[in-house]
Structures are given as structure tokens and as C-alpha cells.
Image (tube, rainbow, N blue to C red):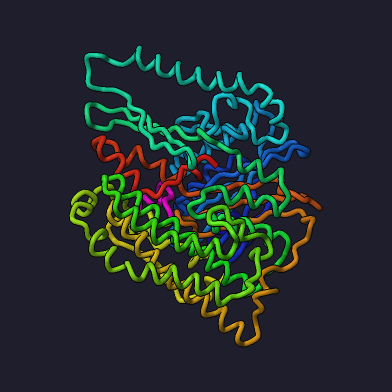
Amino acid sequence: MEKLKELLAKFDIEYVEDYKTNWVKAKLKNPSDLLDIVQALIDEGVKSCSTVSPTDFLEENKMEVNYFLEDMTSGRHVWLKVDIPREIESCEIDSITPLMPSANWHELESYSTFGVKFKGHPNLRYFLISTDYYGKYPFRKDFDYEEHEKNLIENIAEITDEYHDEYEDHERTSNADGSETILNWGPTHPASGPIRLKVTADGEIVKKIDLDIGYVWRALEDLVTRKDFIGAIVAVERVCFMDNTNPMICYAQAVEEIAGKEITPFAKYMRVILGEVGRSASHLVSMGSFFGTMGLHTFMMWLLDIRESYLDVLDDYSGARIATACVEPGGVRYPLKDYKAFFASVNKALDKLDKHTAELESIFMKNPLMATRAKGVGVFTQEDVEKYYLCGPVARASNQKIDVRLQEPYAAYGDLDIDFVNTPNGDVRDRLLIQFLEVKQSADMIKQAMKAIEAGIEAGEMDPMKDHMVKMPRKMPAGEAVSRVEWARGEMLMHLVTMEKSSSPYRLKIKAPSLNHTLVLDPMLKGKTLSDIPLYYGSMNICQGDLDR
């Protein structure tokens, strides 16, 4: 970390300081230095952009842009900050996308929601938001949602007209005598959100894929600012219900850091149990969906049956199977009135997984059709992983040793006996296999956490009726925190900003993995056939919910 600080100190820096054990935090004085600094960091090994997070300080009349840059090899990370003018005409800064392609869509999101123009971006355009928000920048503090919603019918008409215009334009420009066309490809799900892949194809060959997301954009990052710090949980957990526990852990950690609160060992181990149950429930659905892309639906039925037992665990703890609201700042929400009964429910789920593991391996994981169809295709190298900042199971399937639970331990993960789970080939098959291996790893972590809690209770060091929460302040001090967790799909990062004596977040940036994992569909599928799209897409562990957050 000292080398990174020395590198940054060579530039005109307002300050540079340690932030946590593996982060350096620095603020630039001159926005014009940004590209030189980013290039110097790349030369030092910090090659990936996790996300870009503007904060609109209305009263100070400035826009602060935050860059979260990561070295995926050594685990060294840099948090860069720079102020730029807030006025729309001059709210601009150089794009780092030409240097770090992983920043591409994060800059587009910042432009669309805050109006930050990124000079030199290869395709600066409105992204994520619908047409009725173009040029209005809905995350700025002076945007009036109530006024906007008064024109609901006109807004819907504007969105509809855009699609009609696009269709008519395609009809005019397409060559009726040629073999090239544009296809609109799903998937569409009324609960988790639709996505449109505009596939330019020449016959069966994919030439280009343009991604169109945001169909059910919910503006979650703004919604949390209208709720108190506890009420924000109901918005945060809706990033994606496939694994709803880990986003709550991520958010709660940021609040606790600003409040200066340390949760109890009991709550830390409970967060491990709840987090790994949520991860496993998500992986089970994702694996079944992968087989569904090949027309094999039996696997999904088997896995949904196992997943029911994991959802029973969440139900037994929180009273809800999906929207659990089971984690909040200060610990975990509910005491354990009968920890033995709860652990029996957990063990029932683990036993059911163990009972079917051999069958799942022999019938499905070693399925000859799956091996023929998926082995050796859709390969990501470790260079690809760094270039596009792929994370979680997708990165680990390419043998990248990246896992927030090990590299920046939180909850009780630092006290568990765990190691990286990797596969060597980086192909579509390995992206399925890695999830299966991780479900088994999660079972082992859950067992370790339960054993630690039992030992703590027997030693009189833990009280499951009292130790679930520490008291949190009703009003927060001014502060800023970055929290990361290993979500089912990879790194989730939240950047929280609070004001003095505030009862609600001032700003919450939510970075989730599906944005980057969708970004790579175009380079991954160019030159492939249309029949490859479902298979490749299914291997990327994408959740439309976290795309449309």
C-alpha cells in the first residue's frame, strides 16, 4: 500500500491516506490529472474499475466523483475522489473507459442519472433510465419526482414513441435483399425484470449485441434516501431476491462503520449463516437456469426442491422466505428463542443437499450433452477478467483468486477455515461447475458458524436472546463509508454518504456484478451463432433485478 501512496503523492493531491487494510483513499486537486493517475495505477497493477459514484452536494454547488479502482491480483485497491462543477454545462471530466474498459457502463450510468459528461467516452449516451428521464438527471438533489410523475401519461407515450421510431428506422435501413437483420432477444420475466438484447445477425452469425436494460428501473439508490436508516433495508434487499441477505449485510456494514459500532460475535456468525443460505439458494436457481438454456428442465426441478429447504431456514428465522428483512444495522434483526430448533432447520437443508449431491454430480454435472455443448466455449482468460472486472463465480471459474470473504474478511469469515474455490478453464462448463462447488463450500461454512455459536453459548460467551443487536444511534454523524461483500454473483460494493445528525442516507451507491457481466456479452458472442446466446447468457449468472436497481 505504501507504494500506491507514494505513486499518488507525486501528483497534485489534496490528501492521500489509508482506508482499511487494503484500500488507499486520495482526493485529486485537479480533474485534469485523472487520466495520468489512472495510467500510473494501471502500470502499477491496479487495472480494473469496480464502479463510479458521483455525489451531488447541492448546497456546496459541486459534484464529487468517486472512482473505485482495484488490483484483482494483489488485492490492493484505490478510492479516488475529485470535485467538478455542478452546473450542467460544465459538469464534465475525462472518461477513463479508454484506459479501463470496465468503467464503460458505470460512466454511462453516472451520466444518465447525475449529468456528469465523460469526455472521450467511446459512446456516451443515456443508459438505464427510460426516455422520459433523458436530460433530467433524476439522482440530482434538485430533481422533482412528484412533478415528473404528474406527466405520467405523457411519459409513457414518450417511451412508446421511441420504440415505434426505432422499429420504423430499422425497417427503412434494413436491406430486404440481404441476410442481415436485427433481432430482439429476451429474457423477460415480470417479477425480476426484462432485458432486451438487440442482436445484429447475418443469417445465424452474431455480428453485434446492443444491450437495452432498465425496463423496470426502480431508482433504488434514490429511494433509500427517502427512508430512515432502518427502513432503507426494504429497498436494499430488493436489489435481487435470489440472494437478498447479502445486500443487507453490505448496507448494514456501511452504516455501522459511520456510526462507529461493532456488532457482537454472535451476530457476525449469524450473518455468515444467513449470507451463505442466501448464496446457496441463489446458486441453486442459477444452475437450474443454465440447464434450462439447453432445453433440459429436470435439473431445475431437482434444485428447486433442495432450495425449498434453504428458504425454510429463512422462513424459520424471519417469518419470510424471500423478502426477509433479517439483517439491519447493529446486527441481525431477531433473537434466537430456540437456537437448537433453528439449527435443526439449517441441518435439514444441509442434509438434503448432501443426500442428493452424488446424484447431482453423476446425472447432471457430468451430463455428456452439457460437456459437449459447454466445454471449451465462452472462455474468459484472466486478462479478460481484469479488463472487464468480472467477479464472483464468473472470475473464479477462470482461476482468478478473488473473493471478498477472504481478501477483506467481514462478519465472521475471518474466523472460518476457508479457501478460494477455483476451476481452471474459464469456459461455460466451468461457470456451472464453480457454482456447484461453492454450494458445497457454503454448507461447510454454515456448519463452522453453527459450531462456533454453540461453543459460545455453552461457554456463556454468547446469549442468542440478547446478542443479536447492538444499539444504534437514531441520528447519524456526517461520514462516508465503503462496504463490500461477496454476493452470490460476486463483489457487491456500497458507497454510503451521511450528513450531520441525519436520519436518512444522503447518498447510497449500489454496485452489483450483473452490469459488468452483461457488458461482456457483445465481445463474447461476436462471431458465434444465435443458438449460442442462451447458453452463454445462462453461464454469466446475471440477475435482471440488479441490472434494473
| Lateral position of residue 298 relative to residue 266, left or right | left
Q: Quadrant of the C terminus?
A: top right
Which residue, as the protein is rendered here, is positioned at the far top?
A: 172
Residue 453 occupies which quadrant of the picture? bottom right
Any part of residue 6 in sight: no
- Residue located at (44% from left, 45% from top): 516
Q: Nearer the viewer, residue 318 or 182?
A: 318
Quarter of the figure that contains the N terminus: bottom right
Estimate the x, y position of residue 295 in percent, counting from the top left. Answer: 26, 45
Q: Is residue 388 magenta?
A: yes
Q: Position of residue 264 (x, y in %)?
A: 66, 73
Give the residue drawn at x 52%, y 76%.
450
Q: Which residues are magenta?
A: 383-391
Q: Name the residue: 65% across, 63% down.
A: 333
Query: Is residue 471 part of the magenta span, yes or no?
Result: no
Relative to 535, is 118 above or below? above
In the image, residue 142 above or below residue 431? above
Q: Is residue 419 left or right of residue 225?
A: left
Tell me residue 9's x, y (percent).
60, 55
Asked whether 169 or 395 is in front, the reply is 169
Which picture quadrant has residue 287? bottom left
Q: Is residue 73 above or below residue 41?
A: below
